[in-house]
Amino acid sequence: MSILLSAFLPFSGDKENSSLKILEQAQSIWKDQVELSFVVLPVTFGGAWPVLYEKIKTLRPSYVLAMGQDSSRSRPA
């Protein structure tokens, strides 16, 4: 089984993006259990999908987990 995880670069003046932290944690937790691949996406209207789509076409993962961040939240939903 292979999983592609995506996250976004920081945006709106934030110094970090919580989705990037999740990528780091997933790598250490799942590294021996599944084949993991990662992609960090730009935060632009037309930029994220082409990058993600190309990675999906190239890797053909079993699953894609696309993560993001809502800066207006004070805690995870």
Image (cartoon, rainbow, N blue to C red):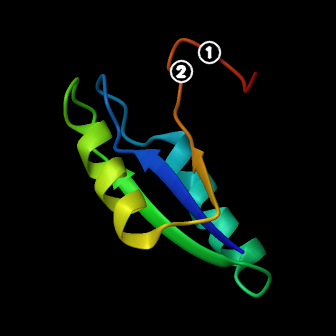
Q: Nearer the viewer, residue 1 or 23?
A: 1
Residue at the limit of the structure toward the top, as seen here:
72
Q: Looking at the image, is 55 positioned above or below residue 9?
A: below
* Place of residue 58 in the rendered image (x, y in percent of width and height, measured from the top left): 35, 69
Q: Quadrant of the C terminus?
A: top right
Q: Nearer the viewer, residue 38 or 23?
A: 38
Q: Which mark is residue 22?
A: none
| Tag 1: amino acid | Arg
* Place of residue 64 in the rendered image (x, y in percent of width and height, measured from the top left): 58, 52
Q: Looking at the image, is 32 positioned above or below residue 75?
A: below
- Name the element at disc 2: loop
Q: Quadrant of the N terminus?
A: bottom right
Residue placed under numbered mark 2 in the picture: 70
Residue at 69% across, 76% down? 28
Left or right, 26 with respect to 42, comes to: right
- Viewer-nearest of discs 1 and 2: 2
Asked if the residue at tag 2 contacts the one at tag 1, i.e. Cβ–Cβ closer than 8 Å, the answer is yes
Residue at 29% across, 26% down? 13
| Tag 2: amino acid | Asp
- Name the element at disc 1: loop
* Place of residue 44 in the rendered image (x, y in percent of width and height, measured from the top left): 21, 29
| Number of marks in the rendered image | 2
How packed mark 2 is, by other alpha carbons closer than 10 Å (few <14, some 14-19, many 20 or more), is: few
Left or right, 42 with respect to 3, comes to: left
Residue placed under numbered mark 1 in the picture: 73
Q: Determine which quarter of the picture holds residue 32.
A: bottom right
Residue at 37% across, 31% down? 14
How packed mark 1 is, by other alpha carbons closer than 10 Å (few <14, some 14-19, many 20 or more), is: few
Residue at 27% across, 50% down? 51
